[in-house]
Amino acid sequence: MDYELTELQQEVAATAERIAQQKIKPVRARYDENEEFPWEIVNEVKKAGLMGVYVPEALGGAGAGNLGQVLASEQFSRACGGIALAVSASCLCGTPILLFGTPKQREKFLTPLATGEKLGAFTITEPSAGSDATATKTTAKLEGDHYVLNGIKNFCSGGEVADVYVVFASTSLKRGARGLTAFIVEKGTPGFTFGKKEHKMGIRASPTYELVFQNCKVPKENLLYKEGYGLFVAQGTFDLSRPGVAAQGLGIAQGALDETMAYIRVRKQFGQAISSFQAIQHMLADCGTAIEASRALLYATAKAMDNSVGPAVEAALKKGTIVFDEMTALDVKRWTKESGMCKVYCSDTAMKVTIDCVQMCGGIGYMRDFPVEKFMRDAKITQIYEGTNQIQRNEIAMMMIKEAASKAKEAVAA
Ligand SMILES: Cc1cc2nc3c(=O)[nH]c(=O)nc-3n(C[C@H](O)[C@H](O)[C@H](O)COP(=O)(O)OP(=O)(O)OC[C@H]3O[C@@H](n4cnc5c(N)ncnc54)[C@H](O)[C@@H]3O)c2cc1C
């Protein structure tokens, strides 16, 4: 299918594919087995200038927008979902800084993330605040020119290896959702340490850590946007970042199908290739169709997002303002529904396709020394993080109902 990608987008996809096939594929099993962080791959991606594909060139990135980021993540995930996350966890830190950071914060924190000089992470989840971020217990108290953070965050991707963290804490527990506030915290800040490292089913090349804040003094200038606007920061970030999870799911599905196709064409039973059995062909057709439908939805959404958010980014860079404020001034559409749809559809595709791929390969598909079972383990997380698929469906339905209500109101007014 021709998705009418620009020259830059084609170049990003081709470079990412080359790194994925030549560098990631040969080492993915080792990183999965050892649960090690893939520094050698991160350095390759950095050398190729793909650590900040979505970041404007003026801030050190490739300037290829959200669609560029999606294309790169898809290709990395086609080889390994875990290594892809090790690379892209930084985006989840960079995106809120791009959207809500001041020009000074963009320059200080986003540019080193975009060039790969530094790695980033994003931490909103807590032991008792998962789907419900408003239950956040970590507190941030303003004392002179510092905020003092206390609390525990968990399940942080890129934890320990990252240098820069976007951390959510409550500046007013009694205000609930309206007390949530985002901060930029640097590794090495006194009072900020790492707790338990998680051992996971999949994406094992990406470290997942508990973070501990004990009287951690964060300079006031590291407040991201405004006190009490944490939910805006989180939601605005997820609107743009969920297509990244969708791309991870899409790449995982495609990677599993690539491996499966190569196998079923040569594996013979009853004197013929198993790809000649209609039962296998129907599964193959369903997998291929779901993948292409996922890709079409994802690319179309990312492209539309770039067209609507791009002018606000340009304006903010030109005027030295905050991107989110320019988005508000330009009345840029909220992408919550569409980005949620991409995440749900592509991640459900990833799960279904990888399960079917194991089935098509039979017993060998279940074995650790054959690459297909890893795709199935890696696929599962795409239905869980950045908001579970149940939460996505809640949000999609809510937006649909709101849209219908406003159309009905307009019709009555006309
Ligand atoms: C490997 C991994 C990496 C992660 N990386 C990060 C990270 O980098 N940064 C970060 O901040 N977080 C991260 N997370 C956390 C992740 O985003 C949360 O696990 C996820 O949002 C779900 O929260 P929870 O685990 O507390 O599940 P819960 O909220 O306890 O949900 C449990 C179940 O209940 C369902 N449920 C909950 N509420 C509702 C509802 N209202 N309607 C319908 N169903 C509901 C959920 O869908 C789910 O099936 C990571 C998690 C994992 C496993």
Image: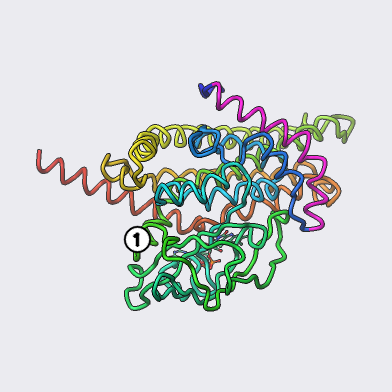
User: Between 250 and 207, which is closer to the camera in this rendering?
Assistant: 207
Q: Main secondary structure of the magenta part?
A: helix
- Relative height, residue 259 to residue 405 (above, below): above
Instruction: Indicate yes or no: mark 1 CB to ligand 1 under 8 Å.
Output: no
Query: Which secondary structure, mark 1?
Result: loop
Task: Residue 127 in the image: state x and y as whole percent.
Answer: 55, 74
Which residue position is annotated with label 1? 226
The residue under the point 63% across, 54% down is 380
The residue at the far right in this view is 271
- Relative height, residue 237 to residue 156 (above, below): above
- Chain part drawn in magenta: 7-34
Instruction: Say few, some or many: other residues with alpha carbon within 10 Å of mark 1 (under 14 / 14 to 19 / 20 or more).
Output: some
Task: Residue 161 in the image: state x and y as whole percent.
Answer: 67, 58
Question: Magenta span has 31?
Answer: yes
Q: Quadrant of the N terminus?
A: top right
The amino acid at mark 1 is Lys
The residue under the point 80% across, 46% down is 365
